[in-house]
Image (tube, grey):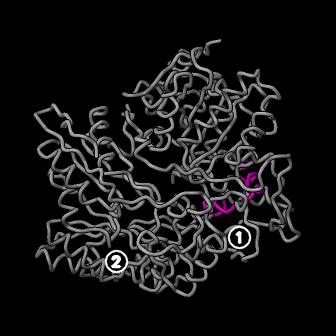
Amino acid sequence: MPVQSVFPRLEPLLARVNKPIQYVGGELNSTVKEWDETSVRWALMYPDAYEVGVPNQGTMILYEVLNEVPDVLAERTYAVWPDLEALMREHGVPQFTVDAHRPVRAFDVLGISFSTELGYTNMLTALDLAGIPLHAADRTDDDPIVLAGGHAAFNPEPVATFLDAAVVGDGEQAVLQITELIRAHKAEGSPGGREELLLRLARTGGVYVPAFYDVDYLPDGRIQRVVPNRPGVPWRVSKHTVMDLDEWPYPKQPLVPLAESVHERMSVEIFRGCTRGCRFCQAGMITRPVRERSAQGIGEMVERGLAATGFEEVGLLSLSSADHTEIAEVTKGLADRYEGTNTGLSLPSTRVDAFNIDLANELSRNGRRSGLTFAPEGGSERLRKVINKMVSEDDLINTVAAAYANGWRQVKLYFMCGLPTETDEDVLQIAEMAKRVIETGRRVSGQNDIRCTVSIGGFVPKPHTPFQWASQADHETTDHRLQLLRDAVRADKKYGRSIGFRYHDGKPGIVEGLLSRGDRRTGRIIEQVWRDGGRFDGWSEHFSYDRWMTAAETALAGTGVDVAWYTTREREQSEVLPWDHLDSGLDKDWLWEDWQDALSEVEVDDCRWTPCFDCGVCPQLGTEIQTGPTNRPMLPLTVTGQRQTLLAQPHS
C-alpha cells in the first residue's frame, strides 16, 4: 500500500519552530518517486541538523546512486531540532523524510552515515521518534534494517546495541549489493524474516551484524575475544573499496539546499584516499589506497554540476587536494574554462609542502582571494616527526612568505593539542611559529595589516591508526597547555594583536575519545545520556560534559572500567581492540611498528613515490594505488556568454 505523507500533520507545527524551511523539502535536484512502483526503499540519514547534513557528499552520492535504479527509492532524513522534537511528540508526528515526508519506519532500510561519534544521541532521537525500538534485539519484521556507515562505523561497537548492521568503507557499490539482497529476499516472500535477511547480509563478508558476534571479557575489563555465533558468519568483515572513480562520477545532480548550509558550493571529489601517513589521521588510514579521478573526469563533473546547480564556487575535495598528480593542469584548465565568469575555485585542504603560488593564483584568477589555511598540526619540529607530518618550520615560513608577497593578507594555521609525547614546550612553539609568520608577512609585503589565525583542536586517538594504542591527554592537561599558549600570544606586544586564537576546551575531546575507542559497554552510556536529554552533542551550546560523566558513572558501575580506562590508558600490543574484527586492510603489526617509529621520532615517506611499506591494504583488498598521468586531459570548453558546450573531441 502507498505510504501517506505526514506533511498535513507537520505543516501546522512549522510556524512554531526555528528555521522551518529546513523541514519542507523540494530542493533543486531532489527526487520523489512513487512508493508502490518501487521494491526496495531506503531512508538515508545524516544525524545532524539539515544545514550540516544536506551538503554532505557521502549521503548525497548514495541518494543519487540508489535513485538511479528504477525500482529503488531513496529519501533523506535529518536530525530535528529540540523545538520540533517536542512538538512532534506532542502531536504524534513520527520521524519523516524531507523528500516526500513519509514516516521513516515504513522504509526497508534506515541508513545512517556517521562522520563523527558525537551524532550517536541524534540517532536515538530519530529511532524513538520513528517508533523503531532502540535496541536491535527488540525489532520485528515491521521495522527497517538500521544500517550504519561512514568513518565512525569503522568502530561501531559503542552503538552495536542499536544497529542491525554496519558497512565499512566506500558505499557506492555496497548499497547496490545490499539492495539486491533485499530485493531477492522480498521476492521470495521474506523467508525467515529479518533474521534470515541479516544472515544473508552477514555471509557476504562485507556487512557487519553485531548480533551475530559475541564479545567475551577478561577479569581486568579487556576484551578476550570476539567470536561469530552463527554458522557461515565470517570472523572478520571486510572494507569496501571503489576503484576507478571515473566510473562513479557522483553526484551528477548535486542538491541545492533551500536553507543556508555550512557549504554553499558545488563540490567534486578529485581523489580518494591518502598515503602521506600522518599517524593521527584516521581518514587517511582507512581510505587507502589513493585513487585519483582523471582531469577529464573532474572537468566533466564540474561542468555538469555547475549547470545543474547554479553555484558560483567549485570545491575540489580530497584529504589533500594539492597532492593530485595533475592538480596544476586541473586548476589551470578550470581557471581558463571559467575565466570571465563568476565561477570561483577552492581547495579546502592544502598541505604546506604541496602549495605553490602558481596554484594559488589559478584558484584566485576570478578575483576571489580568500585566506589560506595550512595544517602543521604539531608546534615543534620534534612533535611533527612523532606524528609523521613532514613539514619543517622553514617550509611553512617560505610558503607564507610567498603568499604574503603575492597579495594575501591572512593565513590560518591549524594545530592539535594533546598529541602523544607532547610537552608544554611543544605547544608554546606554536606561538613562536605564529610570530614568525606575522614578522615574515610584514617584511615581505611591506604592510602591517597582516593576520594569522591559530586554530587548535584536541587530539583524539582513533581506531585503525598507529595511535590507536596511545593514551589520550586528560582535559585538565589540554586546558592547561591552551592557557599557556593563549597567555604567550597575548603577552607579545609586537605581534600578539595580529594573531587570532581559536580553540575548544578539552572536555568534548574526552567524550569523543570515549566513543571512538569504546566497546559495547559504552552503549549504555550513550543511551543514558540520551534519556537524560542529550541531543546535538557536536554543538557546543548543547553539549554537557557533566551529563556524559554522570551517565558514565551510572552505566559503567560494576564493570571494573571507567572513562579514564577508555581514554587516558595506553594499550598493550597484545590487547584485543574492539574493532579488530573489522578489516580496514591495514596490518595490525604494521600499525604497531609505525607506533614504535612514532615514539622513536622516525618519519616514513609517502608510498605513492617510494617502494611499498607493507601496510597491507593493496594485497589484502586486491587494490592498488591509482595516480596520474591518466592521459585523459581535461577537454577544453568554449564559453559564449552564458552558453557553454564541450568541444567535440575524441576521448583519448
Q: Residue at x 39, y 73 (%)?
A: 376
Q: Nearer the viewer, mark 2 or mark 1?
A: 1
Image mark for residue 564:
1
Q: Is residue 438 above or below residue 285?
A: below
In the depicted view, which residue is nearer to us: 643 or 10? Answer: 643
In the rendered structure, which segment of residues is drawn in magenta? Answer: 512-528
Picture coordinates of residue 354, whole percent (x, y): 31, 69
- What amino acid is labelled 1 in the image? Ala
Q: Is residue 2 above or below residue 604?
A: above
- What amino acid is labelled 2 in the image? Arg
Q: Residue at x 45, y 25 (%)?
A: 31
What is the tally of numbered marks visible in this picture?
A: 2
Image mark for residue 87:
none
> Which numbered disc, 2 or 1, marks the residue that appears first in the sequence?
2
Q: For the N terminus, which image quadrant?
A: top right
Image mark for residue 490:
2
353 sits to left or right of 137: left
